[in-house]
Amino acid sequence: MKRVISLISIFAFICAFGLSAGGSAVYAAEKEARFGILTALSGPAAVWGIGNSRGMELGADEINEKGGFKVKGDTYKWKVFVYDHKYIPAEAVKALNKAIFSDKVSYVAIQGGSPSLACMPLLKQNKILALCNAAGGKSVTNPDNPLFFRFNPAIEGAYASAIPYIIKETGCKTVASINPDDETGKGNLVASKYVLGKLGLETITSEFYERGIKDFTSVLTRVISKNPDLIETGMTDPTSQALMLKQARELGYKGAMYLIWGPNPEQVLKICGPELAEGAYLGASPAEPQNDKQREIYERFLKKYPERDWDANYYTHYALFGCLTKAIVESQSFDPFVLADTLETIKWEDAFGPCSFGGEKIFGIKRQMLQYMTLQKVENGKSVVKVISGPIPGILDD
C-alpha cells in the first residue's frame, strides 16, 4: 500500500512540475503562439481576402505538422484566428479588438490600407506586430510605425518590373490611373506617379471610384476622353479590374490596359471573354506550379480546398508564417520590437525566390517586402508569362 501511495505521489509531483515549469515534453507542444488574420471574407475584396487567409493558414499548418518551433527550450505551435472585416475600416477595428482582448493574439495580418490605417492606433497602443497585405503609402508605413510591415508585393516593384516591357511592346507615353477612393487608392496613385514618372510615362489623368460599384462606365468615359495610351487599374480588387477591362473595351477603348494588383487570369477571361481580354497585361503570378516549392504548396492546397478555388496569390501569403517563425527562432524572442529589428535584417525564401524587407528610400524604414514579380499577357485566349523580375535598384532602395 505504501508503495502504491509513493508511486502516486511521484506521479503527482511530475505532473505538478510539468504544469508549473511548462517545459516538459508532455506540455511543450501545447504552447501556442497566437496570430490573427483580419481580411475580407465577404464583399468585393473577398476574392483577395479568402485566398490570402487560406494561404497563410496553409503556411502555419506546415510548421505545425513538422512539430512547431522551439524558443528557449519550449516547443510552440501556431494558433490562427481569422476575422471577416469585409474591407470596411470600422469592421476591421471591431475585429482587432476581438483579436487582442478576447483571443489574446500577439501578431496580426490585416488586408488593405484603409483597414490598416483605421487599426493603427489600436496596434500601436497594444504593441502588436503586424505583417499586412496593405497599401496606404506613408500614412501606414513610416518610422513612427516600426511594428507595421507590408507582407505583400511592392506596388512600386510591380510598376518598375512591368512598365518597361509594356512601353517596349506598345510604345505608350501617357497613362491614366484608376483607384478606389480610400487610403489604399490614394497611396497607390502617389506610388504610380513616382515610378511611372521615373520610367518616362506621363500620368495625364486619374480617377477614383467608390468600392463596391460594378458599373464603371462614367469613370471610364472620362478616362477614355483623355485618350491615354495606357490605362492602369491601381489598387482595384480583382473582380472590379476584370469588369473595368470588359467595360473599357465595350466603350471602344483600343489602348493598352494593365491590371496590376493580383488579378486571377481565369476570372479575367471568364468575365471578359477571350476577345475582350485579348492583349490585357496582368500583374499575376503563374497559376501552374513552376518549381518544386510551388508544386508542394499546390499539392497541400488540394488536400484542404477544392481545385476550383486555386489562385496563384496563395504562393506569396503562404510564406508569411515561415518568415515570422524564422525571426522568432533566430532571435529566440516573442517581443514585437526585437522581432521587428530581426525582420528588418533577415532573408528568407518564398515560392519565387529570395525575399527580404526594404523600401527605406520611399518610407524611411525597411518595412516593405521585396520579392520577385510577374507580368502576364492574354494572348490567343490564354494568359502567358512575359516577365519575372526581382527588385529594381533605385526604386525602393538605392
Image (cartoon, rainbow, N blue to C red):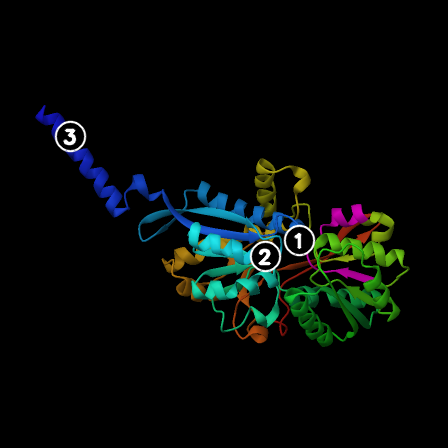
Quarter holding the N terminus is top left
| Residue 157 in view (yes/no) | no
Q: Which residue was labeled with disc 1?
A: 45
> Percent from the top left, x then y, of residue 13?
18, 38
Among the two numbered marks 1 and 3 on one chain, the one whose residue lies closer to the N terminus: 3
In the foreground, 328 or 242: 242
In the image, the segment drawn in magenta is 256-271
- Contact, mark 1 vs mark 2 (Cβ under 8 Å): yes
Q: Is residue 265 magenta?
A: yes
Write the residue at 43% across / 50% down: 102
Q: Is residue 216 left or right of residue 341?
A: right
Q: Which residue was labeled with disc 3?
A: 7
Q: Which residue was labeled with disc 2?
A: 111
Q: Amino acid at mark 3?
A: Leu
In the foreground, 155 or 374: 155
Among the two numbered marks 1 and 2 on one chain, the one whose residue lies closer to the N terminus: 1
* Mark-to-mark CA distance, 1 and 3: 60 Å
* Mark-to-mark CA distance, 1 and 2: 9 Å
